[in-house]
Amino acid sequence: MQKILSGSDVKLLDSLFIAQEGISSWALMERAATAFVDWFILHYKESNHVTVVCGTGNNGGDGLAIARLLFQRGFLPEVFIVGQEPNGTTDFKLNLERLPDGIAFKWLKDQAEMVIGGDVVIDAVFGVGINRPVAGVYASVICRLNESGKPIVSVDLPSGLPSDELIIGEAIRATHTVTFQFPKRSLLLPEHAEYSGVVAVVSIGMDAFDFSCFESELYYLQGCDIPSLHKVFHRFSHKGSFGRFLLIGGSMGKMGAVALGGKAALRTGSGLVTVCVPSCGILPLQSLLPEVMVEACNSDLEVSLPLPAFDRYSAIAIGPGMGIGLGAAQVLEAVLGGFSGAIVLDADAINLLALHPRLKTYLRGKVITPHLVEFERLVGTCEHHLERMSRAREFAVQYGCVVVLKGANSVISLPDGRQVVNSSGTHYMATAGSGDVLTGMIGSLLGQGYCADHAALCGVFHHGLAGELASESKRRGMIASDLVEAIPSTFLRLGIA
């Protein structure tokens, strides 16, 4: 998996990579500009007239190189430069010298001198090096660009946005941010959504570079990471080989959560799926899911004791639609204390952990999948997402469990202190039942014999990819059952047998 480095480490990374490859810093800049232009042409091929706004640092050098490459491919770029010419970096000055005669450029002393004629703006004023709020002409130029109404594509980071911390002051509100090799930490924060826009990560050839000399414990999960995490089955594998999975949950009016989780488990490859629900759920579940077996507890309204014998199952998921009454708490404790196999806890099971803190002592080796509100019920209110991520790491290490903090970029915190940020998914997944689908997927993989780490990583990535695939035709109309039906396509997309 690709490490996510701090902004302060990026300069060192560039130096080490340049030395290893035996290339110049200008050549690395050319790689970055080429990767950006390839992405830009794919997404903005109809935007012939482009306004490129540059600073005088290396991000500005990227912008000048991008303008040159776009010009060579038939675009009509105009360039504005903010700053003083003598202050430019070496590579900025070199790219300025190489700017073709056919590209008009202007030095800006005031934002009033900037007339934005392009169909789209490329923002290359500041990169990862900024460590203070923008001021003066830079702030006025950024405000002018934000007020222009034009689509803005930022190079590496929206200008004014710090690489690792929360924003203070003004920054570009980008439509897209094209960042190099790995997303900068601040692009992953929900507080920065209005600035980062849609984030694209493009490679600049560092994929095989050894990042072990950097101390970051933050990683980026991509499709290329997933196949090696999957188990391999053969033609003599039978339904028992693919796991016997038990899903416990449901209550009057909330059987849909269990139905979604059960079907997701089947679509993820479980050989045998059993759901344990109150007796009122037998008929709807047998009708909705003829492939699952149903175990009913004594209660008509909610899950309660006694439970089916645990020794028949290789993994258990508990929580969706279960409720948080006394009976549900007794069921959760019985599962945590009486089942030695793999367990994933979601929804009301997590709410019960918050209500009964002593149950946290059972969490070693388990997977929990809270959304942001459920997580704060566990650990207390967090001021921002950076604090939330920090507490998730502490929780995973303290209790020896895997914490899947669900969100636009779900963060998987592992017991060894590593945190993995997921790259797949779409905002169209913000729909009721999406989390129940994820529970079924992770539980299915646990039942198939995956370790907790791999089950969480594969489950989260496939879940997000299913959302992407389903949303291609459904968009805002996508519902959780569309996710379930797209799960098999994720295996095909990733080339997994």
Image: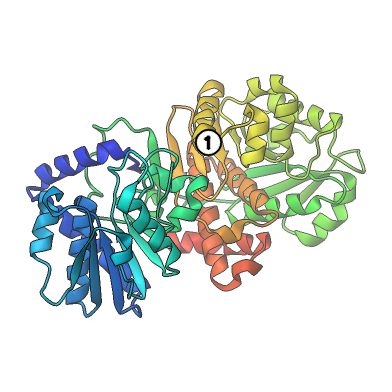
| Image vertical order of residue 245 relative to residue 74, above or below | above
- Tally of numbered discs: 1
- What amino acid is at disc 1? Ala
Helix, strand or loop for disc 1: helix
Tell me what residue is drawn at x 51 percent, y 54 percent. Answer: 462
In the rendered view of the protein, which quadrant contains the C terminus? bottom left
Q: Tell me if 490 is positioned left or right of 358 in this view.
A: left
Q: How are the colours assigned in the image?
A: rainbow
Residue 188 position within the rendered picture, expressed as x and y whole percent measured from the top left = 45, 46
Quadrant where the N terminus is found in the figure: top left
Which of the 4 image quadrants contains residue 43?
bottom left
Mark 1 crowdedness (10 Å alpha carbons): few <14, some 14-19, many ≥20: many
Q: Where's residue 361, x and y in %?
A: 64, 20
Q: Going by the image, does 160 lie left or right of 302?
A: left
Q: Nearer the viewer, residue 256 or 298?
A: 256
- From the viewer's perspective, is residue 425 above or below residue 246? below
Residue under the point 50% across and 34% down: 389
Residue 61 appears in the picture as rendered: yes
On the picture, is 315 further left or further right than 426? right
Residue that numbered label 1 is attached to? 452
Can residue 487 be seen from the camera position used here?
Answer: no
Question: Residue 46, how many percent across, how many down?
Answer: 35, 80
313 to 171, vertically: above or below: above
Viewer-nearest residue: 143 or 496: 143
Estimate the x, y position of residue 265 in percent, counting from the top left: 63, 51
Q: Residue at x 33, y 75 (%)?
A: 118
